[in-house]
């Protein structure tokens, strides 16, 4: 690659994009959200909005920004062994976040003072001999997740009240000992496969700052891919974990509906949305999944317990794997990009070499989109209608509010009712029993997206309809599994000729996370995708932090 090509991929923000201009800087602080559209932020009880007119106190001089975060499991092990301290890991995370904010803009809100205090407490507990799975380890959560004392903006502008209590997922992460450093950027109400908006600016891809990291969990993906934090929680209502994971070279797990609680919501986005982990390795994603998993007493969905970490250490056995490159039926009818086809086909060849039976086959998805659209738009409408200043919402969101209101009630109830028949029809594809004639498949392999990451700003000024068409064209593969509520895992599938990441999905029937995680771990051992890192964005790429 020429130096000019490298500069185009990783160079500074486009000058014509006012959301990407950097603000003034001092040795200890700087404007961390240079968005001229954003209002001056306000301090939450336990955090600080990453918005215009505010600063984040640097925990290290700019010349000594610490290296990328060790993995989640490595952090936990080093803490348990006394090889580092939580205070050092958390302070280093904030230094990396500040150093990378200009080029990446991964975070919406930070909990600097509260997190450092929690890290000091974790160090005292560790010194006293206490051990928990993530005691003292810094992690991030997406900004659709309630953290007590912080507003849950979910990509929106406006003054929103702080949450009274932690969400169930955050409560469980804290119970496992994790230190929540902040909340990562999401597009408005999680609707799109890009993470851009007037409330917070543009979140950029660490592999190429001219491109999006995807959405809606784009901030979590950018933060993990760049090594700012070892892992992060995202959410997935139409691929919003798997798509950013694909476009940033990460492992992203969309678990079974109900595996990780979405409380205080009961059935988020009419059952489409689940919470899940993004990490650089399967073991780290499994560890975060185990820590966050579990139901709230009021949750309607309660799958049986899963030990994801044990699954990541287990061989999957010889599996029947179906390769499907044909997207589900949509209005766009676009074929996948040739480089996507090449990458996913190569991954299928690896699976065959590892001893699995791989053949092309296609599940009978039918007109599953007729169930997705009412549920998705009704979910957006439910959230948008509660915004205290609806005039601040994106015109495309207001369009979805109107559509969701029209499709609510009887239509959305009918869409939910169809799920039983969809489970039976598509579940037959996975029936390996003799009653199903033994010809079913254990796993379905598809591209995660039909295209490489789009450029930043590619969807600016589009109407709601044109945006939806563009999203469907780029990302037609992920959303059917949200309708079904079944698990899927994105795994890195390589890179385009220009160095942009691509991903593939391992999809399974109900409650099949263990099989998918075991297969992903086997692929990882062969492909060693964690050895590839994006270009540095103010963060050193080598050497672990030792806290000494």
Image (spheres, rainbow, N blue to C red):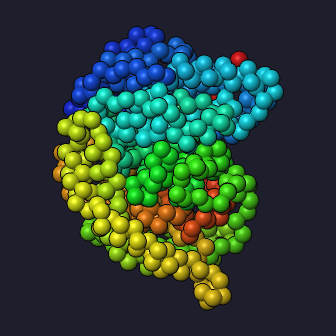
- The front one of 304 and 323 is 304
Relative vertical location of residue 39 with respect to residue 497 in this rendering, above or below: above
Name the residue located 34 percent from the left edge and 75 percent from the top edge. Answer: 367
- The front one of 250 and 182 is 182
**Which residue is most to the front?**
298
Instruction: Give the image location of residue 345, x and y in percent.
Output: 50, 68
Name the residue located 47 percent from the left edge and 80 percent from the top edge. Answer: 425
Residue 219 in view in this figure: no
Instruction: Give the image location of residue 147, x and y in percent.
Output: 49, 33
Relative vertical location of residue 547 with respect to residue 162 in this rendering, above or below: above
Q: Say whether residue 216 is left or right of residue 114.
A: left
Name the residue located 43 percent from the left edge and 13 percent from the top edge. Answer: 29
Location of residue 106 (image quadrant) = top left
Instruction: Give the image location of residue 155, x and y in percent.
Output: 34, 38
Instruction: Give the image location of residue 17, x and y in percent.
Output: 24, 33
**Which residue is most to the right?**
129
Location of residue 348 (image quadrant) = bottom right
Relative vertical location of residue 362 with respect to residue 29 in this rendering, above or below: below
Q: Say whether residue 285 is left or right of residue 212.
A: right
- The front one of 527 and 294 is 294
Name the residue located 71 percent from the left edge and 17 percent from the top edge. Answer: 548
């Amino acid at each position: 690659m020429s130096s000019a090509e490298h500069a185009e991929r990783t160079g500074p923000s486009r000058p014509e994009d006012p959301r990407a201009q950097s603000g003034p800087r001092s040795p200890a602080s700087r404007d961390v959200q240079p968005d001229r559209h954003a209002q001056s932020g306000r301090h939450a009880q336990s955090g600080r909005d990453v918005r215009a007119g505010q600063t984040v106190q640097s925990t290290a001089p700019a010349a000594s920004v610490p290296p990328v975060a060790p993995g989640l499991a490595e952090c936990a092990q080093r803490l348990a062994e006394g090889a580092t301290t939580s205070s050092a890991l958390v302070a280093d995370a904030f230094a990396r976040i500040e150093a990378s904010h200009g080029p990446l803009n991964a975070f919406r809100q930070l909990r600097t003072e509260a997190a450092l205090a929690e890290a000091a407490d974790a160090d005292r507990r560790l010194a006293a001999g206490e051990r928990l799975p993530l005691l003292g380890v810094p992690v991030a959560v997406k900004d659709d997740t309630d953290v007590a004392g912080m507003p849950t903006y979910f990509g929106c502008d406006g003054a929103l009240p702080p949450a009274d209590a932690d969400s169930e997922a955050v409560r469980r992460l804290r119970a496992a000992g994790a230190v929540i450093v902040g909340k990562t950027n999401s597009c408005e109400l999680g609707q799109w496969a890009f993470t851009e908006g007037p409330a917070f600016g543009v979140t950029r891809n660490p592999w190429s700052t001219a491109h999006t990291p995807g959405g809606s969990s784009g901030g979590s993906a950018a933060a993990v891919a760049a090594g700012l934090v070892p892992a992060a929680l995202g959410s997935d209502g139409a691929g919003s974990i798997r798509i950013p994971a694909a476009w940033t070279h990460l492992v992203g797990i969309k678990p079974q509906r109900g595996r990780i609680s979405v409380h205080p919501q009961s059935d988020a986005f009419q059952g489409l949305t689940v919470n899940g982990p993004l990490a650089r390795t399967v073991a780290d994603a499994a560890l975060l999944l185990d820590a966050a998993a579990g139901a709230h007493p009021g949750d309607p969905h309660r799958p049986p317990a899963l030990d994801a970490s044990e699954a990541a250490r287990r061989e999957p056995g010889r599996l029947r794997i179906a390769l499907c490159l044909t997207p589900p039926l949509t209005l766009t009818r676009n074929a996948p990009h040739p480089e996507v086809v090449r990458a996913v086909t190569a991954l299928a060849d690896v699976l065959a070499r590892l001893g699995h039976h791989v053949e092309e086959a296609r599940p009978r998805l039918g007109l599953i989109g007729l169930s997705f659209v009412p549920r998705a738009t009704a979910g957006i409408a439910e959230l948008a209608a509660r915004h205290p200043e609806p005039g601040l919402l994106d015109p495309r969101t207001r369009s979805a509010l109107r559509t969701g209101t029209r499709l609510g009630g009887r239509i959305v109830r009918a869409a939910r009712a169809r799920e039983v028949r969809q489970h039976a029809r598509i579940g037959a594809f996975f029936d390996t029993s003799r009653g199903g004639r033994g010809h079913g498949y254990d796993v379905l392999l598809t591209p995660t997206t039909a295209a490489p990451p789009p450029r930043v700003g590619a969807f600016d000024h589009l109407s709601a309809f044109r945006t939806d068409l563009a999203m469907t064209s780029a990302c037609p593969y992920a959303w059917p599994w949200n309708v079904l509520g079944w698990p899927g895992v994105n795994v890195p599938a390589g890179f385009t000729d220009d160095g942009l990441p691509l991903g593939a999905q391992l999809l399974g029937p109900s409650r099949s996370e263990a099989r998918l995680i075991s297969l992903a771990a086997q692929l990882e051992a062969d492909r060693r995708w964690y050895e590839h890192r994006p270009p540095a964005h103010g963060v050193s790429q080598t050497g672990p932090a030792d806290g000494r």
